Amino acid sequence: MHQIQKLDGATDDSIIQSNEDRLRRFGIIDSTLREGEQFANAFFSTDDKIEIATILDAFGVEYLELTSPCASPQSEHDCRAIAGLGLKSKILTHIRCNLDDARRAVATGVDGVDVVIGTSSLLREFGHGKSTAQIIDLAVEVISWLRQQKIEVRFSTEDSLRSELDDLIAVYQAVDRLGVDRVGIADTVGIGSPHQIGELVRAVAANVSADIEFHGHNDTGCAIANAYAALLAGARYIDTSVLGIGERNGITPLGGLIARLYAHSADLVRKYRLDLLHEIDHLVAEMVGVDVPFNNYITGFAAFTHKAGIHAKAVLNNPSTYEILDPSDFGLTRYIHVAHRLTGWNAIRSRVDQLKLTLSDEQVKAITSQIKQMADSGKLTLDDVDAVIYAHSRHAQSNESIEHFENHLASCPEITDHQPVALEERQ
């Protein structure tokens, strides 16, 4: 049995501090142009890919991963085109573990190559048919050649969570000795839990010196949590895609990872152009023919919308009461929803102030009561609410005019003996 060892001299406290230090150095390998291209609705043209690559580069992702040039002639053309753009983000391509793929990848001018091979018993039996020893021999051959080309190399197992730990460690140690830049852990079917991911990352980190990359699918809804657990356990890089698009349910979404890390510490993600997230999500959504989900992290239309009266009151006093993310950091604004039966008078007061009207608290409370009654009878729009507010405002101004006129009459001696003048209130 292969023995998993802790690093010499490591204590629990030192490991935690070391991982916090590593977390501050985390990086994103965005795979929208590789994993994302495997999404059912994705049919990116060369121009589409260049537009996506350019905006993700402006956002600041450290790496862009592209479809293998071996996939098709157009894929090879696109790989060369993006590698030749001169972007700040390093360009990677994803290949099978064989020399022919490696040679074609290097010829495109990319900065690095991501090599992958399945290690689970299922993939070994029903995929490539190789034993663990044969996988190691093949990996040594391919990686040795790639290292001679002076480019970055990542070696990843596929279906890592359903592979035997002893096999994984043996493979990772073999490629680590060859000097790979990163070893990849892939939860290919999204079966892992945060606890399992953390345990596996720690086991790998204790046995290799290379950086660790995590690629997690979202079949069971844990992709973001698993990516976060991987970083806390010692991984340095996370694979993402815009909106999480990819094979089946996709992988860790770029915006979701940013949101999770922002909640840990906003300083972790300030190196990125956070104000571009909204544009990025909507750009890719349009390209693949889907809507940005209403509850999407950061960029969904409901992300910073507050509705219930007690929520609205607290947020108006101090947004952090119900917001862990500051919308202004993402170039966005919060919205206090007032057109419904759950609204409170503080929310209506906020809308009155936005309309630059002057109404007393009692008047605002009367408006709130009327809106609640209307909402009980049917759906309201903001225009409906504004109409009620303006009507009350006109009524209040009319009353003030009447009161002011009557006060004026009372102050004029020459007409005080006359009959009071009755003025009809405007409705």
Image (spheres, rainbow, N blue to C red):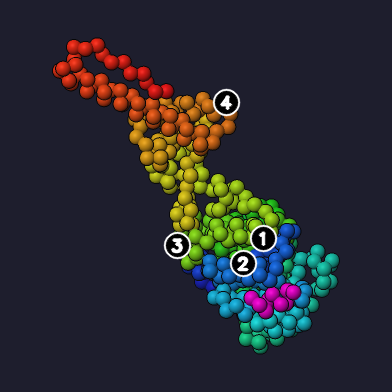
- Relative to residue 338, is residue 179 drawn left or right? right
Three-letter amino acid code at disc 4?
Ser
Q: Is residue 252 magenta?
A: no
Expressed as whole percent of the image width and height from the top left, the position of residue 352 reads 40, 37
Circle 2 — which element?
Answer: helix
Which is nearer the N-term, disc 4 or disc 1? 1
Give the residue at mark 1: 287
Expressed as whole percent of the image width and height from the top left, the position of residue 265 reads 46, 58
Magenta-colored span: 74-82
Residue that lies at the very extreme toward the bottom in this rendered image: 148
Q: Quadrant of residue 427?
A: top left
**Residue in front for this viewpoint, 253 or 378:** 378
Three-letter amino acid code at disc 3?
Asp
Expressed as whole percent of the image width and height from the top left, the position of residue 273 reads 49, 64
Which is nearer the N-term, disc 2 or disc 1? 2
Q: Is residue 322 something one can see in this rendering?
A: yes
Circle 3 — which element?
Answer: helix
Give the residue at mark 2: 52
Magenta portion: prevailing SS class = helix
Q: Do labels 2 and 1 touch, CB within 8 Å?
A: yes
**Residue in front for this viewpoint, 93 or 330:** 330
- Residue depicted at x 51% and y 36%: 383
How far apart, in angstroms, are the residues tagged by discs 4 and 2? 46 Å
**Label 3 neighbourhood size at 10 Å, few (<14), some (14-19), many (20+)?**
few
Compared to 191, does 64 lie above or below? below
Give the residue at mark 4: 377
- Residue depicted at x 62% and y 80%: 84
- Relative to residue 14, is residue 31 drawn left or right? right
